[in-house]
Amino acid sequence: MTHPFLALTDADVEEMLRTIGVSSVDELFRDIPPGVRLDRGLELEPALSEQELSAHLAGLAARNADTTRELSFLGAGIYDHYVPAVVDAVLQRGEFLTAYTPYQPEMSQGVLQSIFEYQTAICELTGMDVSNASGYDGETVTADACFVARHATGRTKIVVTEATNPQVRQVVKTYAPGFGLEVVEVPHRGGVTDPDALRQAADGAAAVIFQQPNFFGCLEPAPDLAAAANEAEALPVAHVDPLSLGVLEAPGRYGCALALGEGQAAGNMPSYGGPHYGFLACRRDFIRRMPGRIVGETVDAAGERGYVLTLQTREQHIRREKATSNITTNQTLLALGGLVYLTWLGPQGIRELGETCLSLAAYAKERLQEVAGLELLFADRTTFKEFAVRLGRNARDVVRDARTLGVHPGYALGRDYEGLDDVLLVAVTEKRTPAEIDRLAAVLAEVA
Amino acid sequence: MTHPFLALTDADVEEMLRTIGVSSVDELFRDIPPGVRLDRGLELEPALSEQELSAHLAGLAARNADTTRELSFLGAGIYDHYVPAVVDAVLQRGEFLTAYTPYQPEMSQGVLQSIFEYQTAICELTGMDVSNASGYDGETVTADACFVARHATGRTKIVVTEATNPQVRQVVKTYAPGFGLEVVEVPHRGGVTDPDALRQAADGAAAVIFQQPNFFGCLEPAPDLAAAANEAEALPVAHVDPLSLGVLEAPGRYGCALALGEGQAAGNMPSYGGPHYGFLACRRDFIRRMPGRIVGETVDAAGERGYVLTLQTREQHIRREKATSNITTNQTLLALGGLVYLTWLGPQGIRELGETCLSLAAYAKERLQEVAGLELLFADRTTFKEFAVRLGRNARDVVRDARTLGVHPGYALGRDYEGLDDVLLVAVTEKRTPAEIDRLAAVLAEVA
Amino acid sequence: MKLIYEKSQPGRRASAIPRHAGLPAPEVPAELRRAHPPRLPEVPEFELVRHFTELSTRNFGVDTGFYPLGSCTMKYNPRVNERLVGLPGFAQLHPHQEEEGAQGALELEWRLEQILAEVTGLDAVSLQPAAGSQGELTGLMLVRAYFEDRGESAQRRKVVIPDTAHGTNPASVTMSGYELTHVQTDTRGNIDVEDLRAKVDEHTAALMLTNPSTLGLFDENIEELERIFHGAGALMYYDGANLNAVCGISRPGDMGFDIVHINLHKTFSQPHGGGGPGGGPIAVRGMLEPFLPVPAVVHRDDGSFGLDFDRPKSIGKVRGFTGPFGVFVRAYAYMRMYGPRLREMSEAAVLNANYVLARLKDAYELPYDRLCMHEFVLSARELKREHGATALDVAKRLMDYGFHPPTIYFPLVVPEALMIEPTETETKETLDAFCEAMLAIAREAAEDPELLKEAPHHRPVRRLDEVRAAKTPIVKYEFEQHPAIVR
Amino acid sequence: MKLIYEKSQPGRRASAIPRHAGLPAPEVPAELRRAHPPRLPEVPEFELVRHFTELSTRNFGVDTGFYPLGSCTMKYNPRVNERLVGLPGFAQLHPHQEEEGAQGALELEWRLEQILAEVTGLDAVSLQPAAGSQGELTGLMLVRAYFEDRGESAQRRKVVIPDTAHGTNPASVTMSGYELTHVQTDTRGNIDVEDLRAKVDEHTAALMLTNPSTLGLFDENIEELERIFHGAGALMYYDGANLNAVCGISRPGDMGFDIVHINLHKTFSQPHGGGGPGGGPIAVRGMLEPFLPVPAVVHRDDGSFGLDFDRPKSIGKVRGFTGPFGVFVRAYAYMRMYGPRLREMSEAAVLNANYVLARLKDAYELPYDRLCMHEFVLSARELKREHGATALDVAKRLMDYGFHPPTIYFPLVVPEALMIEPTETETKETLDAFCEAMLAIAREAAEDPELLKEAPHHRPVRRLDEVRAAKTPIVKYEFEQHPAIVR
Ligand SMILES: Cc1ncc(COP(=O)(O)O)c(C=O)c1O
Ligand SMILES: Cc1ncc(COP(=O)(O)O)c(C=O)c1O
């Protein structure tokens, strides 16, 4: 067994078999009925050495047009923000990387304290009282919120705005039948949601979910949307971009019951969609309905402060079929990345980052408006770092043509919205420069 | 002072100045005569954020044709061997990366024990009794050896074979006058050194330096060369490729007094020439003449085993002008990389690696011989991973043309040796594949 | 140790953000503008690095030492995988990138699916679920979709699980809207077939089973189980948490299972990251393929790879995009470094477990005296009865010997359970040292039980009070109560 | 803790090496073939990772905590530099690559030279020397070449150094074949100008000086020194180890120095790596440029960058290639993140040092009572006389408080020296904690000196016996004496 990941020498094996009292390794499997044994080798390609593997994967990686090789304005939920080197330096510490869920707190104060710090950061960002230790992504935490709302209100309807990320809505709809929920969507009007329309739909609903900034990049009248939900005694749930919260008001400050979102923008690489973390925070009222891990402060036998997993009676390993969720493995490492990133940013940094995004996106709007044939779709709306622009022709064709010039100009909204086949959603993060925006304008002038 | 690498707030500064008893930071510099002060700001470009810096350096890096972008057969002292991921994982541990010389052993058992392990590995490889903790590179450790030999023998002549790496010879010659040494070179005959010629030259010499495999990739009759030196009572010094020592005999086994070399091939990236480590090992006789740090075993106050810097009376901080060298900062981190790499290899791995290099290089020789117009220069010599091939035209021109086809075919020997303008030195490491060698042959068939 | 918030001082910062002169001013309507900045930490970069470096040293991972946490497969995580996942072509690839710009990623996903299909002995794979528990939920959604498609959905409302099942199994049943049927474990640690027979009928939608079970035992009657469920028209779901025992030896598909989730973070070595991420792909028999989540990764006739969203019978999406791609890179890399030698991996895991079992079974009670698979469960019931030392005490005392404790108090069918999974990536020396420690602790329990009850003695903290934490939950830093730290 | 050799077992391995079928057999003549394999460790990959992870936790770095090691400038090492230096375009670039294939690397080197020239106030730079001490040696080779060129080399045989000089200075003088002239330090900590005047004449080749000196004091008579040396036709060499005090404030070139080495690993933050690597570029006045090592990095008229080997007066090469390129990447990155704000860096370093000095000078003896620059030297002479506690004891006791000790017993002119350099990258809180510890230790020395003499108490090892190590040196693992470990 001389594989780099195995250790038993022939002498070891012999001695171990003797101790066990069997004569061969095969004998260890005697409980497996012959009828269900595999009587051949696995039909897989031969083992690769690390060197060969690296060459193979470098080859695969080279066939992807990543954001270091293509000037990218893609967003639509996942963003090309700068991730500072300290994030990876921390995550690569083996003590964090190769640990598991801190069931044994005395072995795990590093992870536990950092989750506690993460929970604090999320509560500060969102203005909420309680955060869990992370969910899978921005989609599933929204489904989680529906489960919370269903049990908190006893109601069976979920309202979600159409201007909410389409994937989020799809996941909510996939989960809904199992939860015994129906899902109602409220259309946008000119790029934002109408509070009155929302109020109507909210009647009898468990929760009202909206996104801020919304999928089109527009700022919703979020306080009014939350008020509309509250009037109907439905729980207002804000799906927010964490990096907008240096400049945009915290959902907790305008009456939301839950605030959640996709954490990727804050400290994770795009990674073709994951792993990232979903953050989920709520008002104290719902603490015992929260899904997932929560870390709490306590003391040790000597009276010193320490941290433990807490309120575990919510969880599947204790409550089984009565648990608030089935989640166990979560996204701790990515959430730790989020904490490191938010610590790196600090309150000034997150405000400046938001301002830089606002300014660059505003500049991009100006530049694209100057291009003949291009028109801002929701020109009178305030946007954050993303905006929709109408092109002369099908957006997917424009994307294809622009890519041959080394620029990915954005997301074709026609993928999800009828009537928007010629609309492009352009994302501008602080990683973009005015010169790169000029290049986008030049390329679109050529191909759009 | 809100720079990411600075911490003092205005309040801090004020309080600190008060404690010191001065009224401004400027006042702290009052001992500097006005005449030697800089009365303007430094004329440097404005500070970059980490993000901007990363973009700038990614731009510079992109203008280098590295071995991931060009199929490379360059060697000539620095080699494209595979460096496994464990090396960097260990070196990036902050406790190793950001520590300094282990003057305080109780704070530094990690570094000290690992150097002790490194010294052991180098002694095992070379067959020597003592290794220091590293020198700057393969060049400077050779100069160090001359200093050892000069003082050990009282003689003032150094003999070095012409088939020794030209840069090594240059550095020895640069150091020699200060050491009071003259340097004599012994020409090669048909790619290797003639023991008889060497014996003559060695008369009255302090040391005889040869390289194994030599700069042309050929295996020297190393035992005979060492014997020739010993006969003249000159110290035989072998400059060896550490990765050849799984298949080639250890210099300690054929009578060398010192063995040394460039460590890069064993665990360091090419990095455009550094930082790497030079290893330097000797017979026990010379232990008190060794330059640089040496770690030794001892016990602590409780009788437990531990490690310390030892024999420090050799060193500059104790002996000052009488020291065996002026070296203090050395290449510990790179040597640690070497130790991790050699541990990864193990005795089987280093033999297999040598065999794979031998086989691939032999295959490359076969393939290139088949190309019309190409001829092996020292066809009857045994080589290790590198060999010289005569082309139809100037090798530098061939290199230039081959590079336009994405292949760097090797090192133009005419850079250093008269009469070899049309000769290419081709290096084949275990990272190359038969298919890549076929591609080299095809490209040379086209351009050579 | 201080919290990062307690190291914060106004005006310090670790980040520098690019600012551009001459651009439009950043504008947000007053009613949407943030009124009070979030109190994120204000620290310079070096404080950040030191803080998290120090925190890490208060944590124990596989890189630190032996971590026999049962059911979690805490094996070595190859360092090369971290390097590969960081390649810009993977890490910096946007998930909305067009197919033509993501051929390498799609090919990797497709190849990973092929490998998983071969290892599980099934036909089609979806990589989308984010972890095992989401795999379970997705699997149950497939069950529902399948029976809906057959018009049996109203009738089949029950999912059978054994009492040894992991908590995620019943929780997933609830979340998918199904009802639970419990079956017992027999005296050999198998499902009690008689109990089962009485409970499986035309109302049964599926069985959920871990095999080898959470007792570390392979169900000897697996073929009979297959006949019972399939005979009743129900489906069989395999919780793949314990796949590490049987790779290349016995495949869930061959055992009769129709749906399998694979925990990539267990068997295929995604580092557990202090709790996650994971990956929970599901493999299914052909008849279930139409219901798999969208998009499906496809290999087109022209040799290209693509995403197929057009699957009318699909249950929909359970997570964003195609799943946790970085986890796939690591799992794929890991499996390529083993290839068909995965069998050796499982053999070594099972050998290690049986060796430790053999050395410990005289000192600790073994409820089911059989050869185990990759893990086994001991009971500290006697220690407790005789010396008052519980499984928890044994666990805490193990810390003092430098080992991570096993899983405790699970599975529920074993009182004072100690669930030990050594994995294949340990030397015999390490296993021996662990056994010596366990044996020493058994002696200590008799001679000096306080030593156990007050353990751990050598960790950065003493035993922590979990009850107190739950009674008055403090779940974030309370700035207001610590005015001193803000000048 | 065991050595890696003691964890070795025949047959284990961490590496897999590609093997190719059908290639020529590997052949080595019998007389050159290795007879006995080297006894490198035989461990699987996970043992390797655990071993070095554990070793690292027995070490203390800047990332661990405060490291006020005087003369070493143990500042924060930005993590981004590690990422940048690993870019394939840098890490995987072969140093023999043609100029056209290395334009980015050459431009970086050229830009770094420009920055160093501006910071030192000199005209030309060679990056080649591998560390400060090699910079010194290279500088002295330049002195020799310069005087040879002027025909004064036989006459000028002496190099003047003060008694405060770092040990590398006299050692470099010997290695370059020069003779030493020592000058004393006056009561204010400056060079004793009267002593000096008598020793500088037409036989003097150069002065070697660190300014601020190793006492952390700026030589107030620097202008007079310049007149004396240049007046005698000698050159002035600046040991740049202490440049961290004066960036943007006072430049060696403006002080009159002709040759300067810069320790990139100190001032410009190359991580010290447990002892190295470093970088010791030298900057010189124009008249010395022809003698600099080859190759020179040049910026050609066509905008391209190249290497010039054709420098007939060059001293030759002191190291391979153009120097330790990876160190250049980090130093360049570091300096670009400061730009003209390097001045703030030095200001903070000096402010921190003076603050700590102000807090400690009542408890410890301060031999030269002046404001200091970036570091200062205290003496434990009184502690020793009164309580028997030496500088060494203070250093060891500091470990118990979680701090790395300062440099001790250097410079030699101060008995029982404690040389403290806080650097700019520390918070006031950390400085205060260090001061409290030092003050507490001074009290402990009076009240309970054994506490110091037996320190450290809380490190992985107790105080180590250095004398024993030197008496019977064991400098490698002796396999033969440990047969037990090999089965
Ligand atoms: C037997 C068993 N089933 C299911 C799961 C759930 O898997 P995951 O943690 O990936 O959600 C686990 C592990 O936690 C397990 O051990
Ligand atoms: C004052 C002084 N000069 C010279 C040196 C030598 O520099 P290096 O260690 O880079 O060789 C040092 C540091 O060790 C030093 O402190």
Image (cartoon, coloured by chain):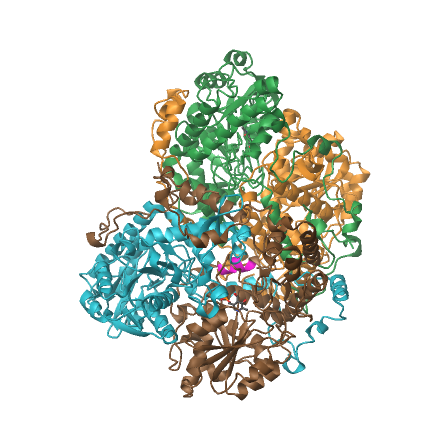
Chain colours: A cyan, B orange, C brown, D green
In the image shown, does D335 or C19 lie closer to the viewer?
C19
Residue C288 location, x and y as percent? 47, 82
* D208 to the left or right of B255: left
Q: Is the magenta stretch mostly helix, strand or loop?
A: helix
**Residue B85 visible, this orientation:** yes
Q: Which of D345 and B382 is in front in this view?
A: D345
Q: Residue furthest right?
A: B231
Q: In which quarter of the image is residue C358?
A: bottom right
| Number of marks | 0
The answer to whether residue D86 shows anywhere in this view is no
- Residue B199 place in picture, x, y as percent: 78, 41
Placement of A118 over or under B298, stated as above or below: below
Left or right, B220 with respect to A84, comes to right
- Percent position (x, y) of residue B279? 66, 43
Residue, far front: C385
Position above or below: C21 against D397: below
Up/down of D127 relative to C427, above or below: above
- Does C82 appear in magenta? yes
Q: Viewer-proximal residue, A38 or B37?
A: A38
Q: In this view, does A119 lie to the left or right of D229?
A: left
Region in magenta? C80-85
Q: Which residue is drawn at 24% across and 58% down?
A: A383
Q: Which of D60 and A408 is in front in this view?
A: D60
Quadrant of image for the C terminus of chain C: top left
| Quarter of the view holding residue D121 | top left
Whether residue D26 appears in magenta in the rendering, the answer is no
Q: In this view, does A49 lie above or below D450?
A: below
User: Residue C286 appears at what percent x and percent y?
Assistant: 49, 83
